[in-house]
Image (tube, coloured by chain):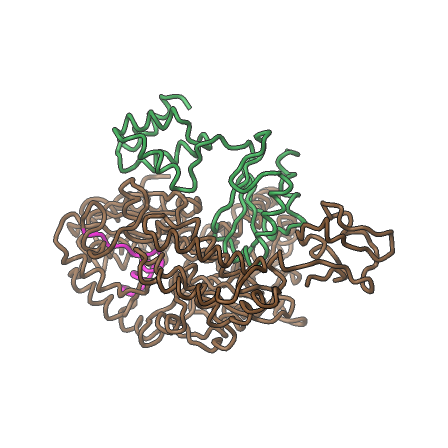
Chain colours: A brown, B green
Amino acid sequence: MNKAKALKSAEELKALFQSLSSEKPVGKIRVTIPNATCSIARGSAGIIRRLEEVLKQKKLSSQVEIKVTGCRGFCQIEPVVVIEPLNVLYQRVSADDVPEIVETSLVQGQVVERLLYPVSKEKRARTEAELPFYSLQKRFVTENCGVIDPTSMKDYLLTGGYQALARALKMKPEEIINEVEKAGLRGRGGGGFNTALKWRTCRTAPGEPKYAIINADEGDPGAYMDRSLLEGDPHRVLEGLIIGAYAIGSSQGFIYVRHEYPLALRNFRTALNQAREYGFLGKNILGSGFDFEVQVNQGGGAFVCGESSALMASIEGKLGEPRAKYVHTVERGIWDKPSNLNNVETWANVPLIINKGADWFAKIGTQGSKGTKIFSVVGKINNTGLVEVPMGVTLKQIVFDIGGGIPQKKKFKAVQTGGPSGGCLPESLLSLPVDFDRLTEVGSMMGSGGMIVMDEDTCMVDVARYFLNFLKDESCGKCTPCREGIKQMLAILNRITEGKGQEGDVEQLEEMSGGIIDAALCALGGTSPNPVMSTIKYFRNEYDAHIRDHKCPAGVCKALVTYSIDPQKCTGCGLCLRNCSTGAIKGAKKKPHRINPKKCIKCGICYEVCKFAAVKRS
Amino acid sequence: MKKAEVDKIINSYGADRSQVIAIMNEVQDEERYLPEETLKHIAQRLKLPLAQLYSISTFYRVFSLVPKGKHQCTVCMGTACHVRGAERVLSELERVLKVKAGETTKDKQFSLDTVNCVGACALGPIVIMDGEYHGQVTAAKARNVLKKPEAK
């Protein structure tokens, strides 16, 4: 491929956009296949390979364009294949479906009915617009994800890419900050801090150079919108960063990507190289006199590095330990210079504000929280995926209308938001409008937007224990309240889940939580008791059942659970017996089987494999 | 890894001290652990105390100071995987391999590790075997994940 000529002005960008727009499409038919982490795990690479083979055999290669994209968000039905101009979406496609798709849809122009998404028993949806999953969504930030090829600069330019940058470079830096302020943009990474205020503080802070940083150390378990944005639309994030850097007066940028996201890193690196080639990075960007470069830093699998001062220490090549922030990192960050850190999604909102205007942006959302937010709706839910909705949509709409409710008609119990810093919200709060302030009011937080749905089979004491166990491993160890406090709280919770809880344990947990909140060094430590506090607040009865009755109502805590076989239901098929690894199950063929509790290690495999629901967990 | 290869990595970062984590990451990716000799060499080249490299190696989860097994089995312990039974999947793998998470089998065939979240929550519980993602793994199916690489 010819090396692109660096663009020297906004006019040259405009001319390039016009010439690209007038180019004829590659083929008559376009087949779009997402190839992001989720889709790859479900075999999208095999579909692409097979499609190329079949098209070659049928000599159709020149007529069909295969567009490999990021994720469209509806992870549950991956891999999806979209065919245009037929305008049809196929779900859960496998490589074996490819010959039929080619013959029926590409050659004959007909629809393969069986691959359409079933909306109900009678009705199948033909296009994305007909899927209930997308009906309440407003996909602005994720508009390109699953639509454009993330490794193609041309694709991004065709969506109007880098025109926000061209526009911004003609504005005064202070004007950009004012625009972002008027839009009401707040940080999407956790705290919901006012973005314009942060930028202005950094701009006016003494010290040169100033640094602009993308926080892509998405550590909250259950949240993956940043991965998806970097995989599916890396240029948008980069464009946001360049605009922000110009507004702040920064000439050096960084991106800190978690180690667990290899594809996101690869796609962003590709975007960086392309941006350099086209002159969106480097010296005198688009003839504006503004210089900017970006360095890539990879994380090492430490959760605490998502915290600003820890992340910056890690960029300096040190241990990712936070420091006390009497002086904020926007004033003294990397090498003690003013450093502005925003998360991936926040940066991705910036081009949108510049392109569509602050007034447009501020019309979306609630009074204190503007724009949209991407949530990852995961756990015990039918439609797992990434959803982008206006702030203020209720939890109920997200869980039931978009998420399709709980699988196997189980009962909803809680939704966990905000990762290890957040809390668990019960059914009574389902009508809560989701924005930064409402979630904080009820003892949780927005965090980066992970929503883990839990059903009646989830034990809330175990969930609290899970998060503390997570935090015990991830505590950097610098401050005592977090390092020792979490460990002690975990010891109490372990005891409770083993049926050895005592009266007064809950009160002690509450007291210790208060101590950690007051005394921990960083925000991650200070919010670490939230999962415990919120489960005590809303699910106290489950704590009491463990402590007083030595029972785990959800049947999760191993020590409190026994397995038995219902002789009425057992057909004696022997499946559990064959799967039992300790020989704890005995029984003659076609006769009810029995579990020897002395040999049983409670692995739960018999419960999982039984086809007649004869294995009981109590 | 030969010294020359390590030097090549160090030089690609301009022997910049602040890039020590990136350099160690590349060695780790290549060797799947950080040999003592290599760490000493990096420390010398970057003029950093060996103790700093040691503390980095033990602070960040991706680094290992001991050699890893031929096959890497990683269980995702994210919240979404947890509520779908990841802990039981892990216990089963620990039992089958006769090691605890973070350890390597005696015959050096398998290393078993956990990861906080790989961000593929729709597929949970997830086990990653030699880079290949296996979704919706149950305790009953866990051992099948291990069978694959041996058959190859």
Q: Position of residue B120 (x, y in %)?
A: 51, 53
Left or right position of A65 against A207: right
Q: Residue at x 50, y 77 (%)?
A: A428
Q: Is residue A424 visible?
A: yes
Which residue is drawn at the image coordinates 26% and 66% (left, top)?
Answer: A194
Q: Position of residue A540 (x, y in %)?
A: 51, 71
Quadrant for the N terminus of chain A, please: top left
* Magenta stretch contains residue A77: no
Q: Main secondary structure of the magenta part?
A: helix
Say which of A594 and A445 sits in front: A594
Considering depth in this image, is A545 or B114 the residue closer to the camera? A545
Residue extent of the magenta highlight: A338-354
Question: Looking at this view, is B142 or A459 the one in front?
Answer: A459
Q: Quadrant of residue B60?
A: top left
Q: Quadrant of residue A562?
A: bottom right
Q: Where is A285 relative to A568, above or below?
A: above
- In the displayed structure, does residue A414 sit left or right of residue A24? right
Where is residue A580 shown, x and y percent of the image? Answer: 73, 48
Q: Is residue A158 left or right of residue A603?
A: left
Q: How many marks?
A: 0
Percent position of residue A267, x then y: 40, 46
| Quarter of the figure that contains the C terminus of chain A | bottom right
**Within the magenta stretch, is there residue A345?**
yes
